[in-house]
Image (tube, coloured by chain):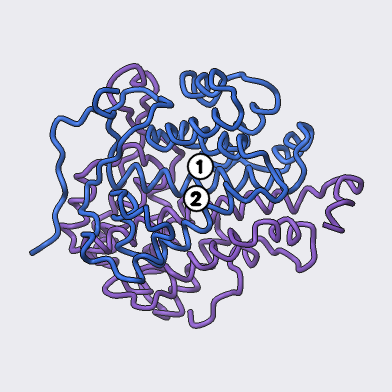
Chain colours: A purple, B blue
Amino acid sequence: MSHHPTDVIDHLVGTQTGSPLDQVRQHRQQARINAQQSYLALFAPATPGRFSLADRFALAAFVAGLHRQPAIADFYAAGLAGQQPATAVAPAISQAVTQGLTEGPYGEFPAGPLSSEDQDGLVYTVADELRTTLGKPLAAAFDHAHMLVFHPRDARPAHLQALLDAGWSTTEIVTLSQLVAFLAFQIRVVVGLRALAASPAPASSNTTEANA
Amino acid sequence: MSDQIVTHTDVDVPAVFTQAQLEWLPWLEPLPAAELTERHYAGLVDPSRAKSPYFMLLARDPDILGARTRTDKDIFYNPDAGLPRAERELSAAATSRLNGCIYCASVHSRFASHHSQRTEDVQRLLDQGVSVDIDPRWNTVIEASVALTGIPLEFDTGHIERLRAQGLDDNAISDVIHGAAFFNWANRLMLSLGEPQQKAGA
């Protein structure tokens, strides 16, 4: 994608300039600006290095798909198509999402009183036939992302070792972790603000805001 | 030399949610202080964060760290309008309790207690979990944070209306949304890049 929306969250929510939601977001201008700067740091970095833009968009489309947010997944899939038109990775992502869908958060707590809250769930790994299409590093990133999305309290050093074994460096693992975790934020802001926009305040309660 | 996992022996892992101060041990090598450049300091935002292994690990990608830190500070510290600080921290603590981030929950339950002076109510959230019954307003903030944390995301206009019925205006509701959303970011980093440890002698 050579062109990025001025504000991806507003783009995905459909925020209208001057709308009540636009005014709400103006009260947290730094959060608004820096959520966009976060997106740009991850999807338009100064130097992508070995973690290519195509792989970043592919991972994002997978994460958005796991969150059952088709419009957001389409946005990132379009970013992937901008990097790699007609790539076999795109259908592989859809299949991986279908195979990885579950409900969260689940996982284990440290042994003790919290063990009664332990909850089993899917431990996902990319299917062999998709692993070849995605390639070893991206497939390992998908495995890790699924854990981060659905059962982050199960994270152990062995998960990071699997990424190192697939060729990811320490610094690249930091970027990969930020990308998945940022999406967990961005997707929730979009879902939350959509609901807020769809439920306008009674006329009386926002009159003072208009002059603020 | 290829990169390696950092191993810690005899870690005193906290086995319950607590408001006590904890340490955090990284599983990957933080950036060595000698390698800090202007760009890294810009990413750290506060130079004092160079003492934290968590921020020094994240400083390996300074641009996303800097943008993330500025997002965080505005959501939680900006005093202009919106939700009282205590309830922004409550949304962070409830999110962390549900995801299972004992470290994040310790920090933000402490902040929620400090700003609300309701230490025992906050402790009940930690002890009983997100289905705790505290009072209608706090229950509604916790319920909204939960609906924005679990997948499928169940947060909808019903949550907005229930928050409004508890006296939250749109700015305050937006703060609940951002507080819970941001901790879905923070929890995943703290849980997956290292682990908490009880402070010696605590």
Of B37 and A59, the residue lying toward us: B37
Q: Which residue is mark 2?
A: A67
Residue found 54% across the figure and 63% down from its top? A34
Q: Chain of mark 2?
A: A
Query: Which SS class for mark 2?
Result: loop
Image-quadrant location for residue A63: bottom left
Q: Is residue B24 visible?
A: yes
**Label 1 vs label 2: CA separation?**
6 Å
Marks 1 & 2, CB-CB < 8 Å contact: yes
Amino acid type, mark 1: Ile
Q: Which residue is mark 1?
A: B151
Residue B192 lies, with reference to residue B165, above or below; the image says: below
**A113 with respect to B79 (left or right):** left
Q: Position of residue B90 (x, y in %)?
A: 57, 34
Q: Please rate how many residues cluster around mark 2, counting C-alpha atoms within 10 Å: few if below 14, some from 14 to 19, many from 20.
A: many
Q: How many numbered dots are placed on residues in this image? A: 2
Of A11 and B59, the residue lying toward us: B59
Residue found 18% across the figure and 57% down from its top? A164
